[in-house]
Image (tube, rainbow, N blue to C red):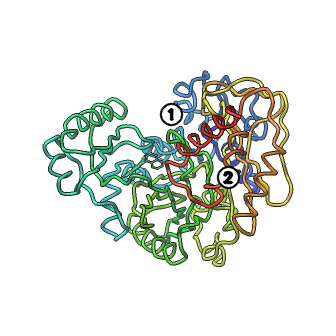
Amino acid sequence: MFNKILIANRGEIALRVICACKELGVKTVAVYSDADRNSLHVRFADEAVCIGPPRSSESYLNIPAVISAAEITNVDAIHPGYGLLSENANFAEVCETSGLKFIGPPPEVIRLMGEKEKARQAMQKAQVPILPGSDGVISSAEEAREWAQTIGYPVIVKASAGGGGRGMRVIRSEDEVEKFFNAAQSEAAAAFGNGNLYMEKFIEQPRHIEFQVVGDNYGKVTSLGERECSIQRRHQKLLEEAPSTRVTDEMRQQIGRKLESCLSEIGYVNAGTVEFLMDEDGSLHFIEMNTRIQVEHPVTEMVTGIDLVKTQILIATGAKISEVIPRIERTGLRGHAMECRINAEHPEKFTPSAGKIKTFHIPGGLGVRVDTAAYAEGVIPPYYDSLIAKLITFGKDREEAISRMKRALEMFIVEGIYTTIPLHRQILEDEEFKAGNIDTKFMERFFARLQEKRAREAAL
Ligand code: MV4
């Protein structure tokens, strides 16, 4: 086992990794920016090192500063959390060459999955279903027009180095090809320093469903079922659940087995998430893979009983999956879990709301979990992402998870800043949500219904 781990992150995920380390008897080192001096990850770690000014680019993303902190504190390994340096293949490489274990996949696997059109080809080779699309990158608008003709409109061009919705354009007819191909290319080149694009058939109203996987260093990869993540706005997820109401046991097993053989072949190690779109017919199609622990990992933990962060650390020490995950937990899912992301934002304008928290009361009780690094009198700095807490509930079925979530949201008190708590309370009362009729356009329809309802009420 490692003696000491540095956590190259902040906020709730830094605290989540500290929890796992404490349970494993591993010492921890926090790194922090000037804006995070009074953060809980600093308080709960055994040691803490300031790595720079508030802006992430000068602190949490500063590779030499993070590596120096690791060297002066003599740690064995680095856990990157999510975001920040977690999917930076160069960082993973620098860790290894500095004699520090990077808790994640090997750099070349991070690099492969970072090139989305290569990841697509790798999945296709292993018979994981993908959408009809181009073979590799498209080098000109003319070539794009030919591919679009083959695939059939509508199509979507995506940046190979992309993700999160940047460098993407939907093309609905031949006369739009040149304009949108060029726009996506310039946007990708500016955002990622790489203008490579590929094309896929466009799905109008997909569900976003992702599979959690874990691989060990001996070629064993195991799939831990899916999460339904369709409730999002502007590519920011708001609410996730496991399992998906639309994935049957048969689909879960079939996709799971294909992912296991594909990722074993690739040499996938540690935790990862494979993203799929579900089309109107209920078929799943691979879109991309994330090579990190995800924000929404707790919903999988609740339905599998597996501590994914402890698993990551144990895998990185060289443990086998058969040693760290009991067979029963690898094969069976139990109950239903749901996560609401509590962001420091105005619930309808979605504008950030930094500042001092005055009151902070966390709900508890059976089936309720809160992952947070926020506290009363604590300050939410404006420099980082707006997630301040994750409220997770578990129940014997979806209805019980929902009723627990409703009462937990009611008992979650945050004063001093705006949060998305009122928004979640409204989503949970929504008939379409209750019926499980959710897809990536859900929030647009939800806000339209809300406006209508308000207009009706105003007219009375
Ligand atoms: C798509 C799609 C429809 N068809 N690909 C958006 C972010 C990027 N990771 C993939 N995205 C999409 N890819 C095809 N072929 C629709 C989206 C999409 C989306 C996907 C998942 C969750 C939310 C989304 C919101 C808008 C568009």
Mark 1 and mark 2 lie on one chain; the one further toward the N terminus is 1
Residue 1 visible (yes or no): no
Observer-side mark, 1 or 2, equals 2
Identify the element where label 1 is drawn. helix
Q: Is residue 263 left or right of residue 301?
A: left
Task: Identify the image quadrant of residue 190.
Answer: top left
| Nearest the eye: 358 or 22 | 358
Residues 45 and 128: in front is 128
Quadrant housing residue 90: top left
**Within 10 angstroms of label 1, few (less than 14), some, or many (20 or more) residues?**
some
Decide: is 165 above or below 220. Answer: above
Residue 296, position in %: x, y?
A: 61, 52
- Identify the image quadrant of the C terminus: top right
Q: Which residue is mark 2?
A: 339
Which structural element holds mark 2? strand
Quadrant that contains the N terminus: bottom right
Is residue 253 depicted above or below 30 in this figure?
below
| Dot 2 amino acid type | Glu
**Distance of label 1 from label 2 (alpha carbons):** 32 Å
Tell me which residue sits at (84%, 60%) in the image.
366
* Residue under label 1: 63
Quick check: is the Cβ at mark 2 less than 8 Å away from ligand 1? Answer: no
Q: Residue at x 52, y 27 (%)?
A: 57
Where is residue 37 shown, x and y percent of the image? 72, 26
